[in-house]
Image (spheres, rainbow, N blue to C red):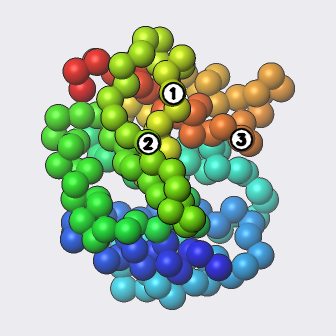
Amino acid sequence: KFIGLCLDSVLRQSYADIGIILVDDCSNDYTAEIALERLKDRDAIVIRNTERKWALKNVDIAIENNMSNDEQVVFLLDGDDELLSSNAIQKMMDKHKDYDIVWSNYQQSDGKGSCSGPLETKPVRLAKWCMSHLKSFKRGLFLAIDKKEFLDEHGKYLKVTWDQAIMLPMAENINRDK
């Protein structure tokens, strides 16, 4: 239902150098077909899983297998999210000149919700969770995470709180000025 709006909001961005990796994690709502149609004129990668992998494993595989430069900036956007401004990516890329991790304000469809600002509490895991939608980081930071952070007590990829499993270790490992 939402993937078309999500992709349209990405395609409307003023920032031109956007690579898109879309993972269809066994949806039954024609996500891949809608994506392929919307992205037919773009250099995009559409991955269709035959078994459900959940978000964290999909992000890990997509970054490891489809990106090669540690300075590349990764943006994570859920299929039901929409960028409200056509210059959202540009604004965040401008911030990436000085920062390795950038996240944005968000607004829920009911008009509520907003969170942004610097992380001021140490340790980071005790700070108010603010790294929500839209989050971005440099690929090298992601690759430096100990993959144990991604696994539950049974050695399986986390199915929930995946965004915290990614963002918190990176925030802990960066230079506080970056």
Alpha carbons under labels 3 and 1: distance apart: 18 Å
Task: Indicate which disc, 1 or 2, sits on the residue closer to the N terminus.
Answer: 2
Which quadrant of the figure has residue 70? top left
Which residue corresponds to mark 2?
115
Residue contact at pointers 3 and 2, CB within 8 angstroms:
no
Is any atom of residue 47 visible in this view?
A: no
Does 78 appear above or below 58?
below
Q: Mark 3 belongs to which amino acid?
A: Val
Does 134 appear above or below 148?
below
Q: Is residue 166 left or right of residue 27?
A: left
State the residue at coordinates (22%, 42%): 96
Q: Secondary structure at mark 2?
A: loop
Q: Which mark is residue 160?
A: 3
Does 60 appear above or below 66?
above
Q: Secondary structure at mark 3?
A: loop
Q: Which mark is residue 128?
A: 1
Q: Mark 1 belongs to which amino acid?
A: Lys
Q: Secondary structure at mark 1?
A: loop
Task: Indicate which disc, 3 or 1, sits on the residue closer to the N terminus.
Answer: 1
Does 66 appear above or below 137?
below
Is any atom of residue 121 visible in this view?
A: yes
